[in-house]
Amino acid sequence: MNGNARILLIGPGAVGGSVAAWLVEAGHQVTLAVRTAFDELRVTVPDKRTLVSRPRVVTDPAEAGDADWVLVATKTYDSAAAAEWLRGANTVAVLQNGVEHVQRFSKWLPADRILPVMVDIPAERDSPGTIRQRGSGMMRVPEGETGRAFVELFAGTPLDVAEASDFTTVLWRKLCLNVAGAVSAIIGAPGGIAWSEPAAEVMRALVSECVAVGRAEGAKLDDSEAETVIAHYRKAPRDSINSLHADRIAGRRMEWDARNGAVSRTARKHGIATPANDMACGLLAAIDERSR
């Protein structure tokens, strides 16, 4: 199937659009499910090239047609809307934030047809169909036949896509990175805020709680995880903007519930206190309310 798969990608925003561009580059037949139609997909990639393509774009699930793969790259809070496109889907890969991919979509599909995907692709959307991929991208999937087939879709592209023998750890390690991003969204400052020691201390508290909850879920996370996350933010360009912060700037609803909310929610199952993440959720929810 490599090079000629029929793929329906739902939600070609910053991450979804970047993935779609590389799938087209690999020779696949890509259809984009969107709210707002656009004529051309333009993705500027790290080597300064711009991938320009004209994949099929549809706004009505009835127009989607058959697909070998359905890739969901919407915001987590748009999952119910994405589910309208899943009728008849055999394999659905969920490219979303958080650690609850399967639980989120098991309302609409059997769990064995859902492939959770950990995505780490730094990208920003300037307008519908116009995206900047600011750094190299990677994706990880659970080991198995479906995971291998997903990896094969990206053969020949520069995206680092592979199976993970310990997918639980991979998911929670990415969540550690994401929960720290709440600081930028709350303060309203780019990633360079990590150089401020008071802000970094809050980031450490958020990550430390995530580590404790992830370990209770079976993830193998190091004691040094918080410092690794701080180093990651400090290594990135000071003007880098994570998706939570980008949504706040644009006045859009933020995806805090799938990030910090997942830590707080999962912690309750294990009787773990997460005051930093609880507070982050409260502040971000209040910002969302005020925005709307």
Image (spheres, rainbow, N blue to C red):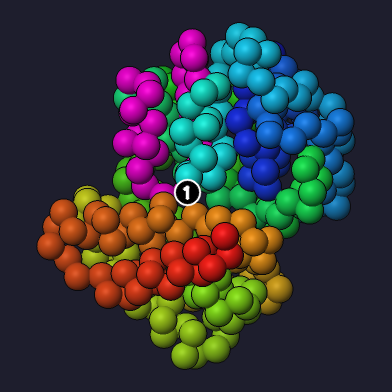
Look at the numbered disc 1 and give the secondary structure of its residue.
Answer: loop
Report the predominant secondary structure element of the magenta stretch: loop
Q: Amino acid at mark 1?
A: Asn
Give residue 74's position: percent from left, percent from top: 56, 40
Quadrant position of residue 37: top right
Question: Is 109 covered by the magenta stretch?
Answer: yes
The quarter of the image holding the N terminus is top right
286 lies above or below 60: below
Kindly identify the residue that appears in the image at 58 percent across and 65 percent down.
291
Which quadrant would residue 36 be assigned to in this image?
top right
Q: Quadrant of residue 51?
A: top right
Which residue occupies 49% across, 90% down?
197
Q: Is residue 59 left or right of residue 291?
A: right
Q: Residue at x 68, y 47 (%)?
A: 14
Q: Residue 101 at x, y = what percent?
A: 39, 38
Q: Is residue 67 magenta?
A: no
Placement of 155 over or under 4, stated as above or below: below
Q: Position of residue 144 (x, y in %)?
A: 38, 25
Q: What residue appears at the point 46 percent right and 33 percent down from the top-left corner?
A: 80
Magenta stretch bounds:
86-110
Q: Which residue is mark 1?
A: 97
- Is residue 186 shown to the viewer in this render? yes
Q: Residue 18 or 32: which is nearer the viewer?
A: 32
Q: Tell whether 219 sits left or right of 86.
A: left
Picture coordinates of residue 153 (x, y %)?
61, 25
Q: Can residue 224 be spotted in the picture?
A: no
Position of residue 60 relative to residue 249, above or below, is: above
Compared with 75, 66 (above or below) is above
Crowd class of label 1 (few under 14; some 14 to 19; many from 20; radius 10 Å)? many
The quarter of the picture where the C terminus appears is bottom right
The extreme left residue here reads 271
Q: Is residue 50 left or right of residue 138?
A: right
